[in-house]
Amino acid sequence: MSTPFYVSPQQAMADRAEYARKGIARGRSVVVLQYTDGVVFVAENPSRALHKVSEIYDRIAFAAVGKYNEFENLRIGGVRYADLRGYTYDREDVTARGLANVYAQTLGTIFSSAAEKPYEVELIVAEVGAAPEDDQIYRLPHDGSIVDEHGSVAVGGNADQISSYLDQRHRDGMTLAEALKLAVESLSRDNNGGERRLTAEQLEVATLDRTRPQQRKFKRILGRQLSRLLDESGGADAGEAADADTGAGAGAGAGAGESGTTAGESGGKVSKDKGSKPDNGKGASGEEGSDGEPLL
């Protein structure tokens, strides 16, 4: 009888971690930013059937990247946990911290089990508070650890590069339009340092808005509202560029202002005209995992 091949526990865990990280890296990134009225979620996701950002409870939202079927199972489990706890005790007892702990236990158990493969997912759980200092953002990698984030966080794809870009430019007190502009700029950057143009049709955007009068603070930003916010940020950039040229004379300044306005309007038209490629049934990223499930 042959001796079974031995693999040390350290090597086995390292291999499982590498497998999960490669799957997550193939998914397109998600960015979460704090702004003055709450928390905004921005994901590159041209699919309208599969969501990467979803509501969990009154003040809590969920974002994920990786294998869609795996993080969708986790989302459903989180909704059931929140509903049961809110019904059994009180709605105020449902918190992002408690939900993050439940997800951490689930992911940690799956990652350390030799009977099944690790989940190829990375999660963000966020809760909006009564004031900006009360907001909570938690990032959960594939191994079930919990990272308490502040200000901004990115997962999936080239998350390290995006996080570095956000850390240098994010500030407290940003408006929704400013935060959205920064998020789109960070997602538009590729690994080679170049930039792509992302249109409203390629983005999935949602907010946890503390100023909403109803108990549920989650809101998706779609269609005309999203296009208008993107156009506002583009028009503001054009206006700043025009103001910078006013030192050349009043006439030149006026001409620059008109051209800046025209550029802002034309930029908005291009954003609407250039749609994304049709969904090919492989999810937002156009890639599939080892078992044929879409990677988002």
Image (cartoon, rainbow, N blue to C red):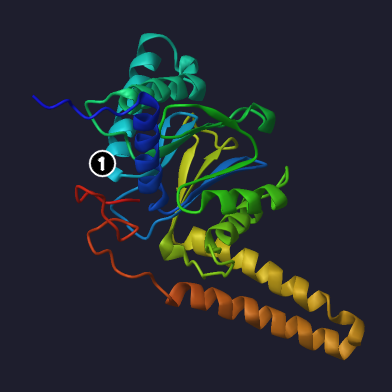
- Left/right of residue 280 with respect to residue 183 in the rendered view: left
Label 1: which secondary element: helix
Q: Position of residue 36 (x, y in %)?
A: 67, 42
- Left/right of residue 69 with respect to residue 169 in the rendered view: left
Residue lying farthest to the bottom in this orientation: 251
Front-most of residues 181 and 131: 181
> Residue 25, relative to residue 238: is it above or below?
above
Front-most of residues 254 and 279: 279
Residue lying farthest to the top in this orientation: 89
> Residue 42, relative to residue 248: is it above or below?
above
Residue at screen point 81% across, 85% down: 254
Q: Position of residue 217 (x, y in %)?
A: 50, 35
The residue type indicated by label 1 comes to Asn
Front-most of residues 286 and 63: 286
Q: How many marks?
A: 1
Binning the other alpha carbons within 10 Å of mark 1 as few (below 14), some (14 to 19) or many (20 upward) gives some
Residue at screen point 64% across, 50% down: 164
Q: Position of residue 225 (x, y in %)?
A: 50, 58
Q: Position of residue 160 (x, y in %)?
A: 56, 49
User: Where is the N terminus found, in terms of image quarters?
Assistant: top left
Q: Quadrant of residue 67?
A: top left
- Left/right of residue 75 with respect to residue 96 in the rendered view: left
Residue for badge 1: 69
Residue lying farthest to the left in this orientation: 1
Q: Quadrant of residue 64?
A: top left
Residue at screen point 36% across, 37% down: 15
